[in-house]
Amino acid sequence: MLANKFRTLCQKFSKDTARISLLGEEIRILHSQPIRYYHTLKHLEHIYKEFQSFKLTPLLEFGIFYHDIVYDVKRDDNEEQSALLAKKRLEELGVSSMLIEEVSQLIIETKTHKASSEVNAIFLDADLSILGSSQKRYKEYTQNVRKEYVFYDDTTYLFGRKKVLERFLDKERIYKSRYFYDKYERQARVNMLIEYNSLI
């Protein structure tokens, strides 16, 4: 599914099928690294499904494919590096400088989840939609995140995880868009509160 969607997207900007194939393979390889358990191709597919009720634009689609293209839990600049790689690849495809900057900005905003536009807010909400999934699926998500941070001992990891949960639970709204707020806000808070209490 993803390979076809990426090919169709890129063909709007380039006729270089060989380059498009190489870029698609790069996305597949990087999202299939053994260090990844949650930030995988499955995560990208999940976001695509969340956008079924929206009109997909090149901004949103390029955002899906490139927002986690660089991922190393030992670094704190994954979003910046992902934005840089996205910029380079989109330039290779002949994408307009304006769209490239919009994609780059969108990727950067996944770091703080502070959206500069309504469209970006919808993307950031979709990226966090797993938080409002069923309790079973949420638990699988937390287990996969733990695997990605395997190099941390339990004490260190649980301390950091609690801080992350506190930041979300302290927010007035986890989801900024009306659509995702109505769909996931309540369940996301239930899921995170259950997890938080289990860490005490």
Image (tube, grey):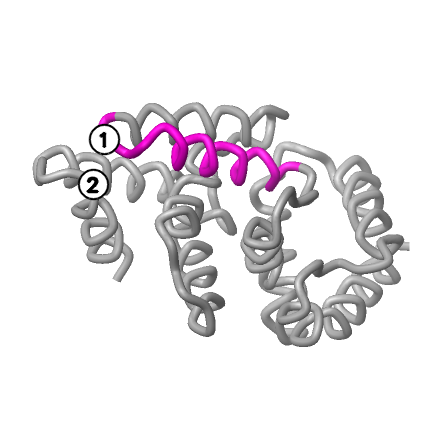
Residue under the image location 54 percent in, 26 percent down = 80
Query: x and y percent of residue 92 in the render?
Result: 23, 26
Query: x and y percent of residue 5 in the render?
Result: 25, 57
> On residue 94, which mark appears?
1
Q: Main secondary structure of the magenta part?
A: helix
Q: Camera-side residue: 33 or 10? A: 10
Which residue matches tag 2?
Answer: 13
Task: Tell whether label 1 touches label 2 (CB within 8 Å).
Answer: yes
Query: x and y percent of residue 197 in the render?
Result: 88, 62
Q: Camera-side residue: 192 or 97? A: 97
**Element carrying mark 2:** loop
User: Which quadrant holds residue 132?
Assistant: bottom right
Within 10 Å of disc 1 (Cα), the crowding (few <14, some 14-19, many 20+) is some
User: Which quadrant holds residue 21?
Assistant: top left
Which residue range is magenta in the image?
92-111
Residue under the image location 28 percent in, 26 percent down = 91
**Element carrying mark 1:** loop
Amino acid type at circle 2 is Phe
